[in-house]
Image: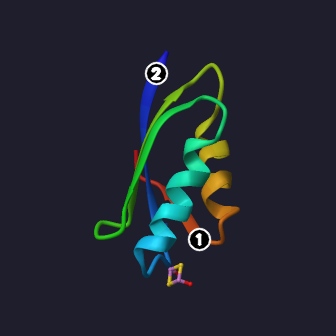
Amino acid sequence: SVLLCRIRIKGMTCTSCSSTVESALQVVHGVLKASVALATEEAEIRYDLKLVTVDQLVEAVEDTGFEAVVIS
Ligand code: 9UX
């Protein structure tokens, strides 16, 4: 089953930052689509809940060096 997750990401200052986070999310097993908006500091992720957890999505963001807080 596919769900949508929104994560607030703190500390991004340029489009290279947001691209790094977006790419990190896109390669996580179970992620179908991920987009990161610098202006809103938000990631929107479509994922298969049988394959990946929200905690793992948060970890993937934090592994890039930015702070992540689940919004919904
Ligand atoms: Mo460049 Mo964005 O170091 O942090 S990738 S400002």
Residue type highlighted by circle 1: Phe
- Report helix, strand or loop for mark 2: strand
Mark 1 vs 2: CB contact within 8 A: no
Residue type highlighted by circle 2: Val
Residue shown at the point (55%, 63%) measured from the top left: 20
Residue 70: give x, y in percent of width and height: 49, 52
| Of pointers 1 and 2, the one earlier in the residue sequence | 2
Seen from the viewer's position, the closer of residues 35 and 42 is 35
- Residue 39 in which image quadrant: bottom left
Q: Residues within 10 Å of mark 2 (few under 14, many from 20)?
A: few
Residue that badge 2 annotates: 2
Residue shown at the point (63%, 34%) measured from the top left: 53
Of the numbered discs in the image, which one, if any, rests on residue 50?
none
Residue shown at the point (50%, 78%) measured from the top left: 11
Residue shown at the point (30%, 66%) measured from the top left: 40
Ligand 1 contact, mark 2 (Cβ < 8 Å): no
- Residue 67 in which image quadrant: bottom right
Seen from the viewer's position, the closer of residues 33 and 41 is 33
Q: Quadrant of the C terminus?
A: top left
Residue 50: give x, y in percent of width and height: 63, 19
Q: Residues within 10 Å of mark 1 (few under 14, many from 20)?
A: some
| Above/below status of 16 relative to 42 | below
Residue 9: give x, y in percent of width and height: 47, 65
Q: Is residue 36 left or right of residue 22?
A: left
Residue that badge 1 annotates: 66
Residue 55: give x, y in percent of width and height: 64, 45
